[in-house]
Amino acid sequence: MPIVPDLPDAGRDADHRDDRGGGAARVSGPLFRDEMPQEPMSTPPQPPPKKRAGRDLRAAIGVGVGLGAVIAASLFVVKAAFIGVIVAAVVVGLWELTSRLRERKGIKAPLVPLAVGGAAMVVAGYVRGAEGAWVAMALTALAVLVWRMTEPPEGYLKDVTAGVFAAFYVPFLATFVALLLTADDGPQRVLTFLLLTVVSDTGAYAVGWRFGRHKLAPRISPGKTREGLLGAVGFAMAAGALCMEFLIEDGSWWQGLLLGLAVAASATLGDLGESMIKRDLGIKDMGTLLPGHGGIMDRLDSLLPTAPVVWLLLVLFVGSG
C-alpha cells in the first residue's frame, strides 16, 4: 500500500458533526491554483511631502490686514481711541484664558473682577502713568481675592493664584502699550513696537519654514528652530534700525539694532511661554475668534512681553517724551 501523510480525516470530522446535528464539513484553504494568495505588488517610493504651513494663509493674511487697518485708524485718527482697542483685546484675551483654565484644569479664575480691573489698569496707565497702572494692578488682585470668597473654599488657593497670574500676564503687560502712547510721538512708538514684533515673527516663520533643521525647544514648541530664531533676529534688527532712524525723533540706527535684538528675544520667549501654557492645558489654540490665527491670546503671546521691553528701551534711548 502507498504510504500517505497523516492528515486529519475530513470525512470522519464531518460524520462526527453530523451525528451532533452540525452541518456539512467545511474545507478551508485554496482549491485551485488561481486561488493561491498572491504576493503584494511593490509600489514605487513616494516623494516626501512638501512642507506646508499649519494654518490657512489666506485667512491669516486677510485677518491680519483687517486688524492692521483697525489699529492704524484708531492710532492715527483719534489717539485715545486706541486705548479702546487695547481694552477690547485685554477683555477678550482674559475671557479666552479663564475659559480654557476652567475647561481643561477646573480652575475658576473670576472673570468679572479681572475684566473690570484689566480695563481700569489700561486706562489708569494712559491717564496716570506707571504709578496708576501699579495701583490698578494691586486693586485688581485684591478684587480677585474678595470675589472668590463668595464661593466654597475648595480650590480657593489655585483659583486666586490663577486670577492674579492672569491679571499680570494680560492687562498689566498690555498697559505698557498705553504708556508708549502717552509720549508726544506716541503713535510712532506704538507703530514701532507693533512693526518690530510682527517683523520678528514673520522672519522666524519664513526662515524657519525654508531653512529650519535644528529644533529650538522641541518639548515646548516643536515647530520652532534655531534657524528661525536667527531669522527673527536679523529681520527685527534691520527693521529696528529703519524705525529708529525714520520714525522715532532723536533716534539712531544703532539704537534700532539693539532694540530689534531685544524684541526678537522677548517675542520668542513670549511665544514659547504661551506654548508652555497651551501644552499644559493640552490645546493647540486659546480660541477660534480669528480665522487662520486662533484666538486673541494666540496673537498677543509675543506682543505682551515685548511691550515693556520696547517702552523701557525707548525711555532709555530718547526719553519718555
Image: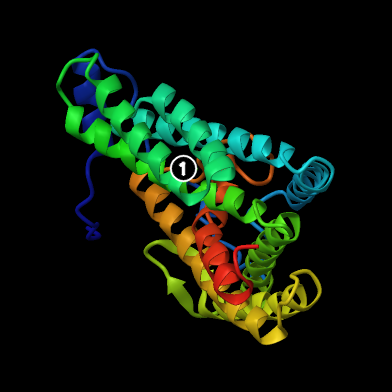
Q: Which residue is mark 1?
A: 132
- Secondary structure under the numbered disc 1 in the rendered image: helix
* Residue 106 visible, this orientation: no
- Residue at image point 64% right, 82% down: 255
In percent of width and height, residue 316 lies at 55, 73
Corner quadrant of residue 249: bottom right
In the rendered image, residue 193, in percent from the top left (x then y), is placed at: 65, 62
Residue 65 sits above or below residue 2 on the image: above
Residue 253 location, x and y as percent? 71, 84
Q: Look at 49% across and 30% down and name the residue there.
A: 95
* Of the pair 122 and 164, the residue shown nearer to us: 122
User: Considering depth in this image, is 289 or 124 the residue closer to the camera?
Assistant: 124
State the residue at coordinates (72%, 80%): 241
Comparing 113 with 212, the one in front is 113
Eyeballing the image, is 171 above or below 252?
above
25 vs 197, left or right, is left
- Image quadrant where one finds the N terminus: bottom left
Q: What residue is at 22 percent from the left and 60 percent from the top?
A: 3
Task: Name which quarter of the figure residue 252 lies in.
Answer: bottom right
Q: Quadrant of the C terminus?
A: bottom right
Q: Quadrant of residue 17?
A: top left
Q: Seen in the image, is 159 located left or right of residue 168?
A: left
278 left or right of 125? left
Coloring applied to the structure: rainbow
Amino acid on which disc 1 is placed: Gly
